[in-house]
Image (cartoon, rainbow, N blue to C red):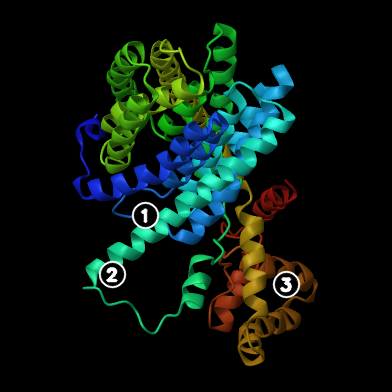
């Protein structure tokens, strides 16, 4: 639970939070003033792109955010179409979340993959979906994302000029800046054996389970369960419990604030002002502490949905229930994955002695192959020197006892292939003659031992 109490103070920035809040709420103000509430989708698109930027102290490059504008808007539209399939939306949510996380599996595109998966789940669960609505959500969320990208570029330009004392880089033209900002991002390098791939599978399966539970319980905003799973689920149990607890505590506090505001207030202009305040604190605390940011994220989302669908202050209660269910499913998923890993590991340990026995039985064959490979690498003079003792000993056998030559040479080669020493290594002729007489009775190179080695080769 150390993450629950940890505060990343360098990520806190009121100025950045206020500037991004203006960019996010601007489409909403224009939409309500013009009588087009569907422009709230542009606010959602801008909100997703700004969250994809990451912590204020270490933001992502603008070319990655430009890619996020298109991928997240496309995911929102595809999620809307997936929500029209009825019960098939459950496996489609699992596959969509899995695919988004796998594509953004590396470190540079991790934020992009996560918020693409979140926007896909939002598109599935948000009511009012249709084929024409999917097209409308596509271009409105893309417009909001590009507007957010423009605001981020202006904010970075102004802050960089202030940090450099008002002097800009004269050597870099606007064409060079455009090429640098639109530089394509590297794709993911996730493999089938990597931890990121297995983690993406776990999140996809948990997302499908979360949507199933939400549909079974009849929750009005069941996509909040999936969003909680995507944010809270981690590869290890400890961080998953910490993030789930932080989200639950922050959601309870934020939902209480949102319920009090939406129940007592129906003035649109007052709600827009409060929305700006909550958005400022939400983006200013981004990356500081997840639980603290949820205190302001929850009122922002509930007020935003009340502006789009008025008179639904009960969404605060369902928000608490959805986040609690999502956190519980995240913890259960990590626990089951961990138990499965331990069972597989203990199974390997139980099979380890059998594997060592098989390896030992193959050692003569492997040793022989290794000896042959080493012999091929020898040069001709070294090979000739190694055969001189064998030729001299064979000559002694021819002179002394000619009938023993084939048996002698065969046994000599087999002994050398196994690294065994026969009793023919004596230097004097008398000693070599004595060793020839005791060749069949030698302990180091007997016919029985050769038969045992031959049977081991065959197996």
Write the residue at 72% across / 32% down: 132
Whether residue 240 is visible, yes or no, is yes
Q: Which mark is residue 59?
A: 1
Earlier sequence position, callout 1 versus callout 3: 1
Secondary structure of the residue carrying tag 3 is helix
**Residue 383 shows which numbered tag?**
none
The mark tally for this picture is: 3
List x then y, in percent, for residue 188: 56, 54
Q: Which quadrant of the structure image shows residue 86?
A: top right
Residue holding disc 2 = 161
**Looking at the image, is 329 positioned above or below residue 62?**
above
Of 63 and 443, the residue lying toward us: 63
Find disc 3 in the rendering and name its residue: 409
Alpha-carbon distance for marks 3 and 2? Answer: 88 Å
Residue placed most toward the observer, 308 or 223? 308
Q: Tag 2's secondary structure?
A: helix
Q: Nearer the viewer, mark 2 or mark 1?
A: 2
Say whether marks 2 and 1 touch (CB < 8 Å): no
Closer-to-camera residue (49/107): 49
Residue 138 shown left or right of residue 297 in the figure: right
Relative height, residue 385 to residue 270 (above, below):
below
Q: Are marks 3 and 2 in contact (CB under 8 Å)?
A: no
| Quadrant position of the C terminus in the picture | top right
Counting other residues with Cα less than 10 Å from the Cα at mark 3, is it few (<14), some (14-19), or many (20 or more)?
some
Task: Work out whether mark 3 precedes mark 2 in sequence or the reverse, and give the earlier one.
Answer: 2
How far apart marks 2 and 1 lie (CA) works out to 17 Å
Report which quarter residue 370 is drawn in. Answer: bottom right
- Please state the horizontal and vertical placement of residue 394, each as a whole percent of the image: 71, 80
CA–CA distance between discs 1 and 3?
76 Å
Q: Is residue 425 left or right of residue 49?
A: right
Which residue corresponds to the image point at 48% horizontal and 28% vertical from the top-left?
Answer: 227
Q: Position of residue 351 (x, y in %)?
A: 55, 33
């Amino acid at each position: 639970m150390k993450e629950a109490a940890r505060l990343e103070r360098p990520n806190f920035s009121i100025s950045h939070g206020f500037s991004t809040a203006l960019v996010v709420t601007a489409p909403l103000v224009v939409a309500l003033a013009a009588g087009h509430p569907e422009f709230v989708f542009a606010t959602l698109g801008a909100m997703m792109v700004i969250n994809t930027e990451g912590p204020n102290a270490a933001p992502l490059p603008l070319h990655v955010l430009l890619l996020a504008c298109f991928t997240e808007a496309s995911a929102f539209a595809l999620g809307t179409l997936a929500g029209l399939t009825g019960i098939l939306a459950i496996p489609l949510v699992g596959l969509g979340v899995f695919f988004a996380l796998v594509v953004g599996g590396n470190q540079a595109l991790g934020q992009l993959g996560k918020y693409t998966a979140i926007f896909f789940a939002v598109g599935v669960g948000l009511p009012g979906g249709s084929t024409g609505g999917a097209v409308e959500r596509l271009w409105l969320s893309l417009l909001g994302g590009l507007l957010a990208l423009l605001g981020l570029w202006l904010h970075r330009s102004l802050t960089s000029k202030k940090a450099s004392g008002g002097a800009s880089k004269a050597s870099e033209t606007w064409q060079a800046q455009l090429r640098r900002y639109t530089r394509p991002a590297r794709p993911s390098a996730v493999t089938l054996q990597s931890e990121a791939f297995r983690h993406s599978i776990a999140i996809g399966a948990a997302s499908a389970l979360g949507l199933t539970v939400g549909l079974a319980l009849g929750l009005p905003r069941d996509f909040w369960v999936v969003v909680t799973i995507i944010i809270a689920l981690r590869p290890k149990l400890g961080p998953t419990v910490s993030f789930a607890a932080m989200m639950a505590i922050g959601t309870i506090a934020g939902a209480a604030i949102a319920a009090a505001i939406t129940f007592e207030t129906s003035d649109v202009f007052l709600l827009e002002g409060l929305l700006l305040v909550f958005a400022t604190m939400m983006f200013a605390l981004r990356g500081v502490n997840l639980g603290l940011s949820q205190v302001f994220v929850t009122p922002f989302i509930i007020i935003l949905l009340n502006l789009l669908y008025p008179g639904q202050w009960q969404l605060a209660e369902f928000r608490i229930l959805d986040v609690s269910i999502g956190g519980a499913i995240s913890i259960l998923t990590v626990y089951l994955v961990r138990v499965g890993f331990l069972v597989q590991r203990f199974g390997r340990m139980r099979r380890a002695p059998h594997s060592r026995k098989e390896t030992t039985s193959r050692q003569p064959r492997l040793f022989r192959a290794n000896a042959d490979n080493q012999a091929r690498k020898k040069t001709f003079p070294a090979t000739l020197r190694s055969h001189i003792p064998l030729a001299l000993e064979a000559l002694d056998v021819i002179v002394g006892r000619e009938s023993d030559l084939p048996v002698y040479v065969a046994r000599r080669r087999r002994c050398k292939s196994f690294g065994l020493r026969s009793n023919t290594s004596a230097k004097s002729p008398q000693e070599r003659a004595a060793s020839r007489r005791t060749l069949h009775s030698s302990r180091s190179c007997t016919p029985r031992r050769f038969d045992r080695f031959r049977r081991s080769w065959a197996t």
